[in-house]
Image: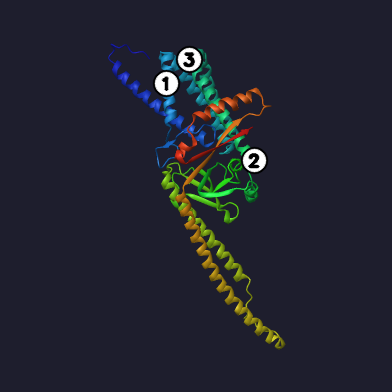
Amino acid sequence: MHVPPAAPMFWPTFIVAILAAIIASQAMLSGAFAILSKALSLGCMPRVQVIHTSHKYEGQVYIPEVNFIMGLASIVVTVAFRTTTSIGHAYGICVVTTFIITTHLMTVVMLLIWKKHVIFIALFYVVFGSIEVIYLSSILSKFIEGGYLPICFALVVMSLMAAWHYVQVKRYWYELDHIVPTSELTVLLEKNEVRRIPGVGLLYTELVQGIPPVFPRLIERIPSVHSIFMFMSIKHLPISRVLPAERFLFRQVGPREQRMFRCVARYGYTDTLEEPKEFVAFLMNGLKMFIQEESAFAHNEVEEMTAGGEVSSDQPSMASGRSTRNAVHSEEMVQARVSSHSSGRIGSFHSNRTVEEEKQLIDREVEHGMVYLMGEANVTAKANSSVFKKMVVNYVYTFLRKNLTEGHKALAIPKDQLLKVGITYEI
């Protein structure tokens, strides 16, 4: 609708148009943020900073990088099209296409999740689908006059998402195929004659089972491991907050004397990563608590096995000729119980002393310093791969990986304590 500048309704129409544009832009931005945050959780997009603006609703997010890109794209489109007519054609095709996609997805939901009757689903699909197809056919005549913009934009974004997801899945399966079982950790350390050096080492990995392939490469190049070594995984859960007491999950890796652990740090979508010093203190306190609980659990198991193995001496003898032997046997069992309880107390004393020594050892190693290790994986296509696969893996994926937020920045790792281990995956 065109309103002449001299018309009485020009300024009211101008104000309403600006308000409508603001509302439409906010709806578009909110939808883009929500969709991309879900794509990130599915591994279909490179890592970007996601800021959750609500403690109650997970879907209310803000992504600075996407906001900047969309603002820049809006300026470019406005300068290129110059008139609202072409932009209107692009907007019309975008809206009608969204209607059609929503109808198809709703049909799938009604069929697989709601399990409605087939006749009801067919009526819904035919009625709404036919109306939307008529609208789409009428507006496709404006495809050349600006309607191509949302289609081209969608194809570019989908291509980037498909390329990223494809390589990420291939990389994950490559790591799973090349992990070292934890049962072979001792053999791996002895084979490379690994020395233990002072300090605490944290190796960040996405895997929560087995030993990642970057670790064997590390000890092959540098046959030394810190006195306390930990395989660290950061996982973000679809809940607002994780209680500090439930933040870390620990597990022993290999024999206890090797002092190697696995830790999974869990964060909600509103939780923020602690500062390096606070994170180290929090992590080490959790490790001490884990060692104490494991020692107590092992001691309780020994006591239960000891109590279960005792035979009661209060059983009456069934024959007078065996009374003497029963009396002797009863006295021996009493002495055995006294001895077992005494040894249990001594074992508990030694266990507590060992736990205290391990806690003191952790404090000493933390004073020696903390080193963060991260795998710098370079993914390339195999030599016998197709040209298309080489383009996707060697160029598209590499470009995205080099221009996204680096891992140590996302995890707030100090640069002076960071050690990157280079490794190449051929997929």
Given residues 269 and 385, the one toward you in this image is 385
- Estimate how packed mark 3 is, as few (under 14), some (14 to 19) or many (20 or more) residues with alpha carbons within 10 Å: some
Residue shown at 47%/52% (left/top)? Answer: 284
Q: Earlier in the sequence, mark 2 or mark 1?
A: 1
Q: Mark 3 highlights which residue?
A: 146
Query: 64 above or below 374?
Result: above
> What distance separates the C-alpha of mark 3 from that of mark 2?
50 Å
Question: Crowding near pointer 1: few (<14 within 10 Å), some, many (20+)?
Answer: few
Q: Nearer the viewer, mark 2 or mark 1?
A: 2
- How far across and how far down the image is residue 315, in percent? 64, 81
Q: Of the residues shown, which amino acid type is indicated by label 3? A: Gly
Q: Tag 2: residue type?
A: His
N-terminal of the pair, mark 1 or mark 3, is: 1
Residue that badge 1 annotates: 74
Which residue sits at x=50%, y=35%? 38
Which numbered dot is residue 178? 2
**Picture quarter with the N terminus:** top left
Mark 3 / mark 2, whichever is N-terminal = 3
Check contact, mark 1 vs mark 3: CB within 8 A.
no
Spatial CA distance of label 1 from label 3 is: 14 Å
